[in-house]
Image (tube, rainbow, N blue to C red):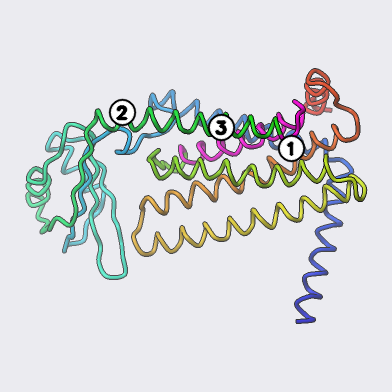
Protein backbone atom coordinates (compact mmCIF):
# COMPACT_ATOMS: atom_id res chain seq x y z
CA UNK A 1 0.00 0.00 0.00
CA UNK A 2 2.81 2.41 0.93
CA UNK A 3 4.69 1.62 -2.28
CA UNK A 4 1.58 2.29 -4.34
CA UNK A 5 1.02 5.59 -2.52
CA UNK A 6 4.67 6.55 -3.06
CA UNK A 7 4.51 5.72 -6.78
CA UNK A 8 1.31 7.74 -7.15
CA UNK A 9 2.89 10.69 -5.36
CA UNK A 10 5.96 10.60 -7.61
CA UNK A 11 3.80 10.51 -10.74
CA UNK A 12 1.67 13.41 -9.45
CA UNK A 13 4.73 15.53 -8.70
CA UNK A 14 6.18 14.82 -12.16
CA UNK A 15 2.89 15.71 -13.86
CA UNK A 16 2.62 18.91 -11.81
CA UNK A 17 6.08 20.00 -12.93
CA UNK A 18 5.10 19.35 -16.54
CA UNK A 19 1.87 21.29 -15.98
CA UNK A 20 3.84 24.25 -14.61
CA UNK A 21 5.92 24.42 -17.80
CA UNK A 22 2.78 24.48 -19.91
CA UNK A 23 0.93 26.90 -17.62
CA UNK A 24 3.63 29.58 -17.88
CA UNK A 25 3.13 29.80 -21.66
CA UNK A 26 -0.36 28.34 -21.97
CA UNK A 27 -1.46 30.87 -24.59
CA UNK A 28 1.10 29.44 -27.04
CA UNK A 29 -0.73 26.11 -26.99
CA UNK A 30 -4.11 27.54 -28.00
CA UNK A 31 -3.22 26.93 -31.64
CA UNK A 32 -3.47 23.15 -31.05
CA UNK A 33 -7.24 22.93 -30.43
CA UNK A 34 -7.88 25.46 -33.21
CA UNK A 35 -5.88 23.37 -35.68
CA UNK A 36 -7.72 20.25 -34.53
CA UNK A 37 -11.08 21.86 -35.33
CA UNK A 38 -9.82 23.15 -38.68
CA UNK A 39 -8.45 19.71 -39.54
CA UNK A 40 -11.74 18.04 -38.58
CA UNK A 41 -13.77 20.48 -40.69
CA UNK A 42 -11.39 19.89 -43.61
CA UNK A 43 -11.89 16.12 -43.36
CA UNK A 44 -15.66 16.48 -43.22
CA UNK A 45 -15.64 18.95 -46.11
CA UNK A 46 -13.45 16.64 -48.18
CA UNK A 47 -15.73 13.71 -47.44
CA UNK A 48 -18.73 15.75 -48.59
CA UNK A 49 -16.98 16.68 -51.84
CA UNK A 50 -16.00 13.06 -52.54
CA UNK A 51 -19.19 11.28 -51.49
CA UNK A 52 -21.89 13.96 -51.37
CA UNK A 53 -22.39 13.28 -47.64
CA UNK A 54 -20.66 14.64 -44.56
CA UNK A 55 -20.95 11.17 -43.00
CA UNK A 56 -21.94 7.85 -44.48
CA UNK A 57 -25.49 7.08 -43.40
CA UNK A 58 -26.23 3.61 -42.05
CA UNK A 59 -29.31 1.55 -42.80
CA UNK A 60 -31.12 3.18 -39.87
CA UNK A 61 -31.23 6.41 -41.87
CA UNK A 62 -31.19 5.21 -45.49
CA UNK A 63 -33.36 2.11 -45.27
CA UNK A 64 -32.41 -1.22 -46.77
CA UNK A 65 -31.69 -4.80 -45.83
CA UNK A 66 -29.25 -6.46 -43.46
CA UNK A 67 -28.67 -10.23 -43.45
CA UNK A 68 -26.42 -12.46 -41.41
CA UNK A 69 -25.37 -15.83 -42.82
CA UNK A 70 -23.40 -18.68 -41.33
CA UNK A 71 -20.94 -19.86 -43.95
CA UNK A 72 -18.79 -22.97 -43.98
CA UNK A 73 -16.14 -22.01 -46.52
CA UNK A 74 -13.42 -19.40 -46.15
CA UNK A 75 -14.24 -16.16 -47.95
CA UNK A 76 -13.08 -12.61 -48.49
CA UNK A 77 -15.42 -9.65 -48.33
CA UNK A 78 -14.02 -8.34 -51.63
CA UNK A 79 -14.90 -11.63 -53.29
CA UNK A 80 -18.46 -11.48 -51.97
CA UNK A 81 -18.94 -7.86 -53.03
CA UNK A 82 -17.59 -8.63 -56.51
CA UNK A 83 -20.07 -11.49 -56.85
CA UNK A 84 -22.98 -9.19 -56.04
CA UNK A 85 -21.60 -6.50 -58.34
CA UNK A 86 -21.53 -9.01 -61.19
CA UNK A 87 -25.17 -9.78 -60.39
CA UNK A 88 -26.07 -6.11 -60.72
CA UNK A 89 -25.92 -5.11 -57.03
CA UNK A 90 -22.80 -2.95 -56.75
CA UNK A 91 -24.18 -1.37 -53.59
CA UNK A 92 -24.01 -4.51 -51.39
CA UNK A 93 -21.54 -4.26 -48.51
CA UNK A 94 -20.04 -7.47 -47.10
CA UNK A 95 -18.57 -7.72 -43.60
CA UNK A 96 -16.89 -10.58 -41.77
CA UNK A 97 -18.00 -11.17 -38.20
CA UNK A 98 -15.76 -13.48 -36.21
CA UNK A 99 -16.88 -14.90 -32.86
CA UNK A 100 -15.28 -17.45 -30.59
CA UNK A 101 -17.41 -20.18 -32.16
CA UNK A 102 -18.02 -19.27 -35.78
CA UNK A 103 -17.44 -16.84 -38.61
CA UNK A 104 -20.47 -15.08 -40.08
CA UNK A 105 -21.08 -13.14 -43.27
CA UNK A 106 -22.99 -9.88 -42.83
CA UNK A 107 -24.59 -8.31 -45.91
CA UNK A 108 -25.91 -4.76 -45.99
CA UNK A 109 -27.76 -3.35 -48.98
CA UNK A 110 -29.60 -0.03 -49.43
CA UNK A 111 -32.90 0.14 -51.34
CA UNK A 112 -34.14 -1.50 -53.51
CA UNK A 113 -34.69 -4.43 -51.17
CA UNK A 114 -32.34 -7.39 -51.43
CA UNK A 115 -34.36 -10.53 -50.81
CA UNK A 116 -33.13 -13.65 -49.08
CA UNK A 117 -33.57 -15.67 -52.26
CA UNK A 118 -31.48 -13.26 -54.34
CA UNK A 119 -28.66 -13.24 -51.79
CA UNK A 120 -28.60 -17.03 -51.40
CA UNK A 121 -28.61 -17.52 -55.17
CA UNK A 122 -25.61 -15.23 -55.65
CA UNK A 123 -23.66 -16.89 -52.85
CA UNK A 124 -24.46 -20.44 -53.96
CA UNK A 125 -23.45 -19.60 -57.54
CA UNK A 126 -20.05 -18.69 -56.10
CA UNK A 127 -19.87 -22.10 -54.40
CA UNK A 128 -20.68 -21.04 -50.86
CA UNK A 129 -22.96 -23.02 -48.61
CA UNK A 130 -24.85 -20.56 -46.45
CA UNK A 131 -27.63 -20.54 -43.90
CA UNK A 132 -29.58 -17.41 -42.97
CA UNK A 133 -29.27 -16.46 -39.30
CA UNK A 134 -31.06 -13.12 -39.21
CA UNK A 135 -32.78 -10.69 -41.55
CA UNK A 136 -33.90 -7.09 -40.96
CA UNK A 137 -35.42 -4.63 -43.39
CA UNK A 138 -36.08 -0.92 -42.88
CA UNK A 139 -38.35 1.01 -45.23
CA UNK A 140 -36.73 4.07 -46.82
CA UNK A 141 -39.62 6.35 -45.81
CA UNK A 142 -39.38 5.26 -42.18
CA UNK A 143 -35.61 5.69 -42.14
CA UNK A 144 -35.88 9.23 -43.55
CA UNK A 145 -38.24 10.11 -40.72
CA UNK A 146 -35.77 8.54 -38.26
CA UNK A 147 -33.05 10.77 -39.69
CA UNK A 148 -35.11 13.97 -39.41
CA UNK A 149 -36.10 13.18 -35.83
CA UNK A 150 -32.53 12.22 -34.88
CA UNK A 151 -31.06 15.46 -36.25
CA UNK A 152 -33.82 17.44 -34.51
CA UNK A 153 -33.11 15.66 -31.22
CA UNK A 154 -29.38 16.31 -31.57
CA UNK A 155 -29.96 20.00 -32.30
CA UNK A 156 -32.35 20.39 -29.36
CA UNK A 157 -29.86 18.66 -27.02
CA UNK A 158 -27.07 21.02 -28.10
CA UNK A 159 -29.27 24.11 -27.74
CA UNK A 160 -30.45 23.07 -24.27
CA UNK A 161 -26.87 22.37 -23.22
CA UNK A 162 -25.75 25.80 -24.49
CA UNK A 163 -28.63 27.52 -22.70
CA UNK A 164 -27.90 25.79 -19.41
CA UNK A 165 -24.21 26.70 -19.65
CA UNK A 166 -25.06 30.35 -20.28
CA UNK A 167 -27.52 30.44 -17.38
CA UNK A 168 -24.93 28.83 -15.10
CA UNK A 169 -22.19 31.39 -15.83
CA UNK A 170 -24.24 34.36 -17.10
CA UNK A 171 -21.32 35.58 -19.19
CA UNK A 172 -20.70 35.18 -22.88
CA UNK A 173 -16.93 34.55 -22.73
CA UNK A 174 -16.78 31.46 -20.43
CA UNK A 175 -20.02 30.16 -21.96
CA UNK A 176 -18.57 30.46 -25.46
CA UNK A 177 -15.38 28.69 -24.34
CA UNK A 178 -17.40 25.72 -23.06
CA UNK A 179 -19.54 25.54 -26.19
CA UNK A 180 -16.46 25.78 -28.43
CA UNK A 181 -14.80 22.85 -26.66
CA UNK A 182 -17.93 20.69 -26.84
CA UNK A 183 -18.57 21.53 -30.50
CA UNK A 184 -14.93 20.73 -31.21
CA UNK A 185 -15.29 17.30 -29.56
CA UNK A 186 -18.33 16.48 -31.70
CA UNK A 187 -16.69 17.76 -34.90
CA UNK A 188 -13.47 15.80 -34.29
CA UNK A 189 -15.42 12.63 -33.48
CA UNK A 190 -17.39 13.02 -36.72
CA UNK A 191 -14.13 13.46 -38.65
CA UNK A 192 -12.87 10.24 -37.08
CA UNK A 193 -16.06 8.51 -38.19
CA UNK A 194 -15.48 9.74 -41.76
CA UNK A 195 -11.87 8.51 -41.79
CA UNK A 196 -12.68 5.12 -40.24
CA UNK A 197 -15.81 4.70 -42.36
CA UNK A 198 -18.06 4.43 -39.32
CA UNK A 199 -21.62 5.05 -40.55
CA UNK A 200 -24.04 7.39 -38.83
CA UNK A 201 -26.62 5.12 -37.23
CA UNK A 202 -28.86 5.37 -34.19
CA UNK A 203 -26.01 3.87 -32.16
CA UNK A 204 -23.24 6.20 -33.36
CA UNK A 205 -25.59 9.19 -33.03
CA UNK A 206 -26.22 8.13 -29.43
CA UNK A 207 -22.44 8.10 -28.93
CA UNK A 208 -22.23 11.69 -30.21
CA UNK A 209 -24.98 12.66 -27.77
CA UNK A 210 -23.07 10.96 -24.93
CA UNK A 211 -20.01 12.99 -25.91
CA UNK A 212 -21.95 16.17 -25.17
CA UNK A 213 -22.46 14.91 -21.62
CA UNK A 214 -18.84 13.81 -21.16
CA UNK A 215 -17.54 17.10 -22.57
CA UNK A 216 -19.82 19.20 -20.39
CA UNK A 217 -18.53 17.35 -17.31
CA UNK A 218 -14.88 18.31 -17.82
CA UNK A 219 -15.66 21.84 -19.00
CA UNK A 220 -18.00 22.56 -16.09
CA UNK A 221 -15.42 21.22 -13.61
CA UNK A 222 -12.82 23.57 -15.09
CA UNK A 223 -15.10 26.61 -15.37
CA UNK A 224 -16.56 26.20 -11.87
CA UNK A 225 -13.21 25.87 -10.15
CA UNK A 226 -11.60 28.72 -12.07
CA UNK A 227 -14.46 31.23 -11.90
CA UNK A 228 -16.47 30.37 -8.79
CA UNK A 229 -13.93 29.02 -6.31
CA UNK A 230 -11.88 31.55 -4.40
CA UNK A 231 -9.54 29.24 -2.51
CA UNK A 232 -5.98 29.09 -3.77
CA UNK A 233 -4.33 30.86 -6.68
CA UNK A 234 -5.59 30.72 -10.24
CA UNK A 235 -2.78 28.31 -11.07
CA UNK A 236 -3.80 25.98 -8.21
CA UNK A 237 -7.44 26.02 -9.29
CA UNK A 238 -6.55 25.19 -12.90
CA UNK A 239 -4.24 22.39 -11.76
CA UNK A 240 -6.91 20.94 -9.46
CA UNK A 241 -9.45 20.95 -12.31
CA UNK A 242 -6.90 19.44 -14.69
CA UNK A 243 -6.19 16.50 -12.37
CA UNK A 244 -9.89 15.79 -11.91
CA UNK A 245 -10.76 16.21 -15.58
CA UNK A 246 -7.91 14.12 -16.94
CA UNK A 247 -8.76 11.36 -14.48
CA UNK A 248 -12.39 11.41 -15.66
CA UNK A 249 -11.41 11.35 -19.34
CA UNK A 250 -8.77 8.66 -18.85
CA UNK A 251 -11.28 6.44 -17.08
CA UNK A 252 -13.76 6.88 -19.92
CA UNK A 253 -11.13 6.17 -22.57
CA UNK A 254 -9.97 3.03 -20.76
CA UNK A 255 -13.53 1.76 -20.37
CA UNK A 256 -14.57 2.36 -23.97
CA UNK A 257 -11.28 0.98 -25.31
CA UNK A 258 -11.94 -2.23 -23.38
CA UNK A 259 -15.52 -2.29 -24.71
CA UNK A 260 -14.22 -1.88 -28.26
CA UNK A 261 -11.67 -4.69 -27.87
CA UNK A 262 -14.15 -7.12 -26.31
CA UNK A 263 -16.95 -6.40 -28.79
CA UNK A 264 -14.53 -6.71 -31.72
CA UNK A 265 -13.22 -10.06 -30.48
CA UNK A 266 -16.71 -11.44 -29.87
CA UNK A 267 -18.69 -10.05 -32.80
CA UNK A 268 -16.26 -8.26 -35.11
CA UNK A 269 -17.42 -4.93 -36.58
CA UNK A 270 -20.71 -4.12 -34.89
CA UNK A 271 -22.84 -1.30 -33.58
CA UNK A 272 -21.26 -1.72 -30.16
CA UNK A 273 -17.69 -1.45 -31.47
CA UNK A 274 -18.67 1.63 -33.51
CA UNK A 275 -20.14 3.32 -30.43
CA UNK A 276 -16.97 2.58 -28.45
CA UNK A 277 -14.74 3.88 -31.27
CA UNK A 278 -16.67 7.15 -31.52
CA UNK A 279 -16.45 7.65 -27.74
CA UNK A 280 -12.70 6.99 -27.64
CA UNK A 281 -12.05 9.45 -30.49
CA UNK A 282 -14.21 12.12 -28.87
CA UNK A 283 -12.71 11.70 -25.40
CA UNK A 284 -9.16 11.85 -26.79
CA UNK A 285 -10.06 15.08 -28.58
CA UNK A 286 -11.65 16.47 -25.41
CA UNK A 287 -8.32 16.60 -23.57
CA UNK A 288 -6.53 19.22 -25.73
CA UNK A 289 -9.78 21.03 -26.56
CA UNK A 290 -10.57 21.49 -22.87
CA UNK A 291 -7.16 21.87 -21.26
CA UNK A 292 -5.40 23.79 -24.07
CA UNK A 293 -8.48 25.56 -25.42
CA UNK A 294 -11.11 26.27 -22.78
CA UNK A 295 -8.49 26.54 -20.04
CA UNK A 296 -6.56 29.20 -21.97
CA UNK A 297 -9.67 31.32 -22.50
CA UNK A 298 -10.69 31.03 -18.84
CA UNK A 299 -7.16 31.85 -17.64
CA UNK A 300 -7.12 35.03 -19.73
CA UNK A 301 -10.62 35.87 -18.59
CA UNK A 302 -9.87 35.32 -14.90
CA UNK A 303 -6.74 37.48 -15.25
CA UNK A 304 -8.97 40.31 -16.48
CA UNK A 305 -7.68 40.30 -20.04
CA UNK A 306 -11.13 39.54 -21.49
CA UNK A 307 -14.21 41.37 -20.28
CA UNK A 308 -16.35 41.53 -23.42
CA UNK A 309 -16.93 39.35 -26.43
CA UNK A 310 -15.05 41.78 -28.69
CA UNK A 311 -12.05 41.82 -26.35
CA UNK A 312 -12.12 38.01 -26.24
CA UNK A 313 -12.13 37.81 -30.04
CA UNK A 314 -9.22 40.26 -30.18
CA UNK A 315 -7.22 38.32 -27.59
CA UNK A 316 -7.86 34.97 -29.28
CA UNK A 317 -6.90 36.44 -32.62
CA UNK A 318 -3.66 37.66 -31.13
CA UNK A 319 -2.89 34.23 -29.66
CA UNK A 320 -3.38 32.65 -33.08
CA UNK A 321 -0.94 35.01 -34.78
CA UNK A 322 2.30 33.25 -35.57
CA UNK A 323 5.21 35.01 -33.88
Residue 266, position as x, y percentages in the image: 36, 64
Main secondary-structure element of the magenta-colored stretch = helix
* Count of numbered circles on the image: 3
* Front-most of residues 106 and 212: 212
Residue 144's disc is 2
Q: Is residue 66 above or below residue 273?
A: above
Question: Disc 3 marks which residue?
Answer: 158
> Which is more N-terminal, label 2 or label 1?
2
Specify whether residue 277 is painted magenta.
no
Circle 1 or circle 2, nearest the eye: 2
In this picture, which residue range is highlighted in magenta? Answer: 168-194
Question: Disc 1 marks which residue?
Answer: 294
Residue at the location (83% across, 24% down)?
Answer: 315
Q: Is residue 173 above or below residue 244?
A: above
Q: Classify 10 Å Cα crowding around label 1: few (below 14), some (14-19), many (20 and above).
A: many
* Front-most of residues 268 and 303: 303
Circle 1 or circle 3, nearest the eye: 3
Q: Is residue 164 above or below residue 136?
A: above
159 lies left or right of 55? right
- Alpha carbon separation for disc pair 1 and 2: 37 Å
* Front-most of residues 175 and 73: 175
Q: Which of the 4 image quadrants contains residue 246?
A: bottom right
Residue at the location (23% across, 47% down)?
Answer: 107
Q: Which of the 4 image quadrants contains residue 149?
A: top left
7 lies left or right of 38? right
Amino acid sequence: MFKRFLATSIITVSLEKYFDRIYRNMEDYFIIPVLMVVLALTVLGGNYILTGQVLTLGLDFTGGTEMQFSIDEEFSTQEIESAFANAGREDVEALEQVTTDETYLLLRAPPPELTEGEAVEVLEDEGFGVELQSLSTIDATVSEEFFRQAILAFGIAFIIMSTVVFIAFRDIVPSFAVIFAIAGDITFAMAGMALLDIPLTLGSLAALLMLIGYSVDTDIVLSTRVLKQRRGSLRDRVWSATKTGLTMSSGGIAGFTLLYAVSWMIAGPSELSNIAAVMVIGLLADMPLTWLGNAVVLKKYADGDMETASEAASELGGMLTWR
